[in-house]
Image: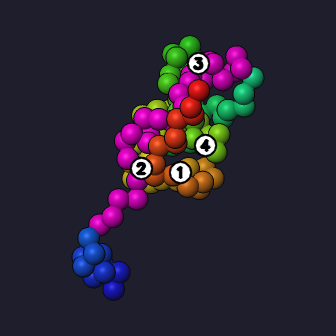
Amino acid sequence: ALTAVGELVGTVSKGLPQEVIDALPRCTHKQLHEQGKACMDKCCICQLEYEPEEEEELLQLPCAHYYHKECITQWLAINKVCPVCNHELPATKPASKAA
């Protein structure tokens, strides 16, 4: 029955637009440690440990979870929720703050 509904309505993307993903804050694991911020030692998506000396780029979600940029970019293209806590990300870019 659900397949028939899907065929009638078409498929709907549950992911985020690329410009929203591109607007997420970026950092490295080394920067997080230098700032004293808590972060898991491995990416929950690929299960690989972060390599601080490699200067791997991480993206931070609004819920304060961090992931490899490549991993979370692919994830958010098809899902708009955090893989750890299921926090739903808004499908629009946050408004830039006026100075």
Residue shown at the point (38%, 47%) measured from the top left: 17
Tag of residue 16: 2
User: What is the count of numbered marks?
Assistant: 4
Q: Position of residue 81 (x, y in %)?
A: 53, 53
Sequence order check, earlier mark of 4 and 3? 3
Q: Which residues are magenta?
A: 11-35
Task: State the residue position of label 4.
Answer: 62
What amino acid type should be assigned to the residue bearing mark 4?
A: Pro
What amino acid type should be assigned to the residue bearing mark 2?
A: Leu
Residue shown at the point (59%, 56%) measured from the top left: 86
**Viewer-closest of 61 and 74:** 61
**Residue 96 seen in render:** yes
What amino acid type should be assigned to the residue bearing mark 1?
A: Leu
Q: Are marks 4 and 1 in contact (CB under 8 Å)?
A: yes
Disc 4 on helix, strand or loop?
A: loop
Sequence order check, earlier mark of 1 and 3? 3
Sequence order check, earlier mark of 2 and 4? 2
Q: Are marks 4 and 3 in contact (CB under 8 Å)?
A: no
Task: State the residue position of label 3.
Answer: 52
